[in-house]
Structures are given as structure tokens and as C-alpha cells.
Image (cartoon, helix red, strand yellow):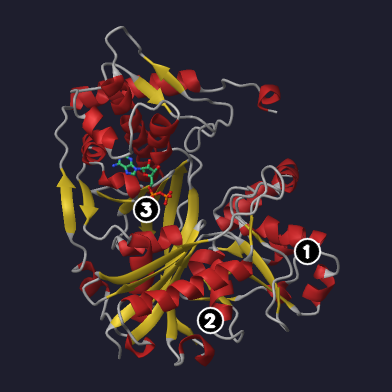
Amino acid sequence: MGNYIMAVDQGTTSSRTIIFNHAGEIVSSSQQEFEQIYPRPGWVEHDPELIWASQLKTIREALDRANLQAGEISAIGITNQRETTVLWDRRTGKPIYNAIVWQCRRTADFCKELQEEGFDAKLREKTGLVTDAYFSGTKLKWILDHVPGARREAEQGHLAFGTIDSWLVNRLSGGKVHVTDYSNASRTLLYNIHELRWDDEILERFDIPSALLPEVVPSSHPVACTDLEILGISVPIAGIAGDQQAALFGQCCFDPGTVKTTYGTGCFMLMNTGREAKPSACGLLTTIAWGLGGEITYALEGSTFIAGAVIQWLRDELKLIRSAEESEYWASMVEDSNGVYLVPAFVGLGAPHWDPHARGAIFGLTRGVNRSHLVRAALESIAFQSKEIVDCMARDSGLGLTELRVDGGAAANSLLCQFQADLLDIPVRRPKVLETTALGAAYLAGLAVGYWRDKEEISANWSVDREFHPRMSQNRRRNLVTGWERAVARSKNWVSPEEEG
Ligand code: ADP
């Protein structure tokens, strides 16, 4: 058995590889950006060959940088940008079209059609997802509808569909293996998360032949070995999970009711709900967190579109700060936001409001409001939005929260973390290793090959960088939340559908 685990982290803008040791510490890493393709407004594609080439380069570079031989790697775990859709020819291993990226809106009209005929209720019930162009199923259908001869080839069993995890496993295994894990399958809009199978009724409505679907495997399980061509020896691929689910695992949120939030450009929050798939009353997604040890763990997921992006806006558009880090300095110059609320509804509002016609707004301006108050209000808006989602999760799941584990770029901001703890009235904990996505993939792979014994051993690796305890009075919290709710209410329904174009 080797001394290390390799995590292959294929993201939307870059491919990365990180090598971890037994303590869950980073030993080496490598990252490579690749091209984003925008064929038309609202369309986003990636070249699957470029994804593969950039990923392979980082795999080799991460080994080189730490002077490691492939034989020292016990197993490889894969984590990936979710929902992005690839179709390739099984005979040649070549993609038949570019990968359609999760952000791509080209199938919005088909989603509308499904909603109008009421099929969305069925999709929600079976897949836990909302009917949106975001998920893989409608993208897959689009390729079959638009690439000449594709559906016929698919029916004859010549084509393979996969999310990016499937694509990478296929390439890593020298074209031998065609699988995806439960967490990625649950993002396709084609997978019945209760019965744990591809859903015939959905496949029929989408006109998708089942012959092109991957086998669904546990997230922690030896599924393939790398082809000798890749690293000179054969290394087991033993972990797969979509990026947000991997981060939940990397944060060691193993018990029902545990929650992680990633403060990146947007904010992604997942709550472990244990063996139960909990439906949401406020528009959160019900999804599979992972399949491990013969059991399925479910999660509730909510996201806000704008989180760290509001800080970028202060920096790039308003030029109130020179760097994202500087936001903490300015915000900490003042005790509070001086009654100012900034609602960053730049692209409308997601859960629990779901108002595409809302727009950003700043309320409560008075003569004494200065730069610090505005910066503080922007940071606070990230925490207010997260609180709304946490409240939904608590309601939907019926599970009490005891802490929030944070990661992502803006988690470095201690003022934000403190304000979040104050608003939620629970401790916020920030781990030492913030690369939780890659770490989660490494843990899933390491568990499958016995590199780590069990989840308890992994949990012992989770060590806190800093812990933020709530210290706000009940009264003040209530007043702040009331103020936020009034601000959100006034930012809603701002543009009319015509104005929006
Ligand atoms: P992504 O993975 O979405 O690209 P990251 O996790 O790298 O995002 O985080 C980057 C985001 O975090 C940016 O939007 C940036 O404005 C924000 N950010 C980074 N550092 C800080 C900080 N110290 N305070 C507030 N926001 C920050």
C-alpha cells in the first residue's frame, strides 16, 4: 500500500490534482486552467479532450512536484464539476460533441415545456430536483436531438453518456469502464433517487435510450484501475463524488443535521439528512450525498447565486476596496452597518424566494453612511442569505443544527464568520484544510482501499483553524433579521419580464 491518496478535482474553470497524506494534509498540488467556449449568448461548452489533457497534466505534475512515484499512491478519488454532460463513441472513445456545461441555458425552452405539461412535479418527486436547464438530462437530450444520427447510434449501443466523473474514469481506465457514482447520477434529472435506478418513465419522456447510460456505483468503491499507459503502473480509482457532495464529505459532515457551506463566488450549502430523502417546502434540492458501505446518505442542498461575488463587485465596479481581503479591514472599522442593508440580487433571488425579477438594492442610506458601512453591509448580506437557507434546511429536515462548517475563498474572512455565527446562534467552524472538495474525494477513495479504516479515523483528521461563537443578543438578532426581510421584500419583483428581455 502506498503512502498517499490522489484527488483529481475537475472544476468548471480549471483541472487540479492534490495529493494528501494520512493526516489529510496537502503534500503536493497542480492546477491548470482550460478554455471556456461560449458559442452563443447563454451557451457554455468545454472541449472534453482539453479537460482530459489538462487533468492528466496536473496528475503527472502533482507527482513530479513532490518527487513521488505512482506506486506510492494507494488510490485515486475523483471529484468534478457537476451536471456537465459528455457523449462519446464507445468504439473510438471520442466525444461526439463538446461537453455542455452546467451553466448552459440552451435547454430552458424544453424545461418550460415540461413545466407546462406538469411533468415537473413528477421530476421533483422522483429525482428531488427542480426542472431546470442546469441538470444533465435535458443537455443529453439536446445532443441526441441535434447531432445527426446520434439517437440511432445510441439506440444501437454505440454511444456512452457521462458526467465529467464518468468521462475521466473512462479515459483513466483506457476506455474500459463506464460508470458514475450515486451523487453524480442524482444530478442528471434521469435518476430515481428513491428506487436507485434510471427512471424509465423519464427516459421515455426525454426520448433517451437506456443503452447509453453508465452503471451507477457507490461513491467509495474500487471501480477501475488506471491504464498502464497513464502512469506506468495500475492505480485503483476508488472514490467518486460531485464537488459539493465531496466537500460535505471532506468537512466530515457524516451525521444527520450536519451542514457545510462553501462561500465562493456563490454560496453552496448542503445538509446531511441521513437515510432519508427529505422533500423541501421552500425550493431546496433533495439529492444523494454519497453511497458508502451499502448505504445511501441523502442531503438537502441550497445555493445563493451571489456571495463572494458581491465583494468582487465592491472591488471591481465600485472600487471601494482594492482586494477581497481588504473588505475585512474596512468592515471592522465600524460596529455595525449603520442601518444599511445591501441585497445582492444582481441576477434575481434563489431559494427560498425564487424571484428572477428581483434586483440588487441598498436600503437605509443616511448622511452618516460611509465606505465601511457599505462594505460591512455587503459582507453581512452573504451571511443573511446563508441564514435563510439554513432556516429552510432546518424546517424541511426537522433536524436541529448544532454548528456550521465553512470553507471557500470568503471563509477566510473572520468578520463574516463571526457575523454568521451571531445570526445563526450556533458556532461556525473553519477547518485548517480548506480544500475540502479534493479532500472529500481523497477520503472516499482511501476508505474504499483501507488506507483509512473508517469515518471515525477520518473525523480525527478534521482540525479547526478557528471557531466563532455566537455573542449577539436575541433582540439585536431579531432586529437585524427583520431589517433584512424588509429589504429583501422591497428588492423583489423589480424588473418586469419584458424589461428583462
Ligand atoms: P470559486 O471557487 O467560486 O471561484 P473561491 O472559493 O475561490 O470561489 O472564492 C472566491 C470568492 O471569495 C471571490 O468572490 C472573492 O470575492 C471572495 N473572497 C476571497 N477572499 C475573501 C475575503 N477575505 N473576504 C471576503 N471575500 C473574499
- Left or right: residue 102 versus residue 276 is right
Which is in the foreground here, disc 1 or disc 2?
Answer: 2
Where in the figure is residue 310, as x and y percent of width and height? 41, 34
Q: Quadrant of the C terminus?
A: top right
Residue at x 53%, y 60% (from the top left corner): 82
Tell me where residue 368 sits by quadrant: top left
**Residue 342 versus residue 18: which sits nearer the camera?**
18
Residue kind at label 2, given as amino acid type: Leu
Disc 1 packing (10 Å; few <14; some 14–19; many ≥20): many
Where in the figure is residue 397, as x and y percent of width and height? 38, 49
Residue at x 35%, y 29% (from the top left corner): 378
Regarding mark 1 in the picture, which secondary structure is present there?
helix
Tell me where residue 167 sits by quadrant: bottom right
Which is in the foreground here, disc 2 or disc 3?
Answer: 2
**Residue 296 versus residue 308: which sits nearer the camera?**
308
Position of residue 314 relative to residue 225, above or below, is above
**Residue 500 versus residue 427: which sits nearer the camera?**
500
Q: Quadrant of the N terminus?
A: bottom left
Where in the figure is residue 111, as x and y percent of width and height? 70, 47
Report how far apart the C-alphas of labels 2 and 3 lie in the structure.
32 Å
Identify the mark at residue 271; answer none if there is no mark.
Answer: 3
Residue at x 21%, y 38% (from the top left corner): 418
Can residue 295 be seen here? Answer: no
Identify the mark at residue 172; answer none if there is no mark.
Answer: 2
Where in the figure is residue 381, as x and y percent of width and height? 36, 31
Q: Quadrant of ligand 1?
A: top left
Where does label 1 land, which residue?
A: 144
Disc 3 packing (10 Å; few <14; some 14–19; many ≥20): many
Residue at x 85%, y 69% (from the top left corner): 149
Regarding mark 2 in the picture, which secondary structure is present there?
helix
Regarding mark 3 in the picture, which secondary structure is present there?
strand
- Left or right: residue 333 versus residue 239 is left
